[in-house]
């Protein structure tokens, strides 16, 4: 693609680094910004810069937050004895949108994937164990994507936590194998949470 400006080319190159954004889409986005008033573009730039510089991760569940403790963990209305284990913030948002879950979360920050060089030590596993050691947790729900990496991670975590006196369950498989939670419709995801099954039972299916 030929550009009439090096500044334009550099901006398009940066936008093209975003997931799912090709060069043509990047060019369209850049040209859109150029057509906006300067204050609007500066507002956009400040929002991105502030996000990167000031964003925090909850010290309890590791979800993205504006403060040390996220709103979900800080809420007195949430059931602290029930922890839903998810891969990342996108899954928290997907489950919250169902309005059918009132517990708290634990964000692993990824899934075990030897092919990608991601092992258990790269995930927030130790802090999960620490939460369980308090004795306050009565149930954990594995709500990970129905993929090989998701199943591998659940299998590993189950071995780490099965000695605790807690209920260990997993979301019902209304989600097709290979599906990621963020793309599942809210009704299906909500039912999968509500009709969760004991993890040991899921192994026999």
Image (spheres, grey):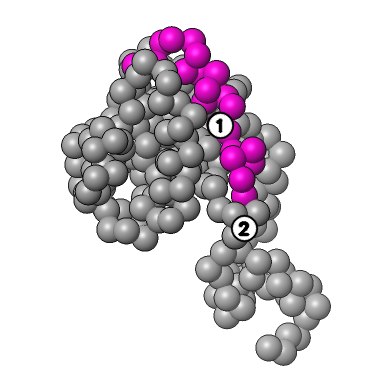
* Residue farthest along the right direction in this orientation: 6
Q: Is residue 79 visible?
A: yes
- The answer to whether residue 45 is left or right of residue 181 is right
Image point 71% across, 39% down: which residue?
Answer: 53
State if disc 2 and disc 1 touch (CB < 8 Å). no
Q: Is residue 121 magenta?
A: yes
Secondary structure under tag 2 reads helix
**Residue 26 coordinates in the image, percent (x, y):** 60, 72
Q: Is residue 191 magenta?
A: no
Q: Residues within 10 Å of mark 1 (few under 14, many from 20)?
A: some
Give the residues drawn in magenta, as a range: 118-138
- The answer to whether residue 191 is left or right of residue 134 is left
Q: Is residue 32 visible?
A: no
Nearer the N terminus, badge 1 or badge 2?
A: 2
**Residue 132 coordinates in the image, percent (x, y):** 47, 18
Image point 41% across, 26% down: which residue?
Answer: 162
Q: Which residue is mark 2?
A: 116
The quarter holding residue 103 reads: top left
Split into 4 quadrants, where in the image is the N terminus? bottom right
Q: Which mark is residue 125?
A: 1
From this view, report whether residue 188 is shown above or below residue 164: below
């Amino acid at each position: 693609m030929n550009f009439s400006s090096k500044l334009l080319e550099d901006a398009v190159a940066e936008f093209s680094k975003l997931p799912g954004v090709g060069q043509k889409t990047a060019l369209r986005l850049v040209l859109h910004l150029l057509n906006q008033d300067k204050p609007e573009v500066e507002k956009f730039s400040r929002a991105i810069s502030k996000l990167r510089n000031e964003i925090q991760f909850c010290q309890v569940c590791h979800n993205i937050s504006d403060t040390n403790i996220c709103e979900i963990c800080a809420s007195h209305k949430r059931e602290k004895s029930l922890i839903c284990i998810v891969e990342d913030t996108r899954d928290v948002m997907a489950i919250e949108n169902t309005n059918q879950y009132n517990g708290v979360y634990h964000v692993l920050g990824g899934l075990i994937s030897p092919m990608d060089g991601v092992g258990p030590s790269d995930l927030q596993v130790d802090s999960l164990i620490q939460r369980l050691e308090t004795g306050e947790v009565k149930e954990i729900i594995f709500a990970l994507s129905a993929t090989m990496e998701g199943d591998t991670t659940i299998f590993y975590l189950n071995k780490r936590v099965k000695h605790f006196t807690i209920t260990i369950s997993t979301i019902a498989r209304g989600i097709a194998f290979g599906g990621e939670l963020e793309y599942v419709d809210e009704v299906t995801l909500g039912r999968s949470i509500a009709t969760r099954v004991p993890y040991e039972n899921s192994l026999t299916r």
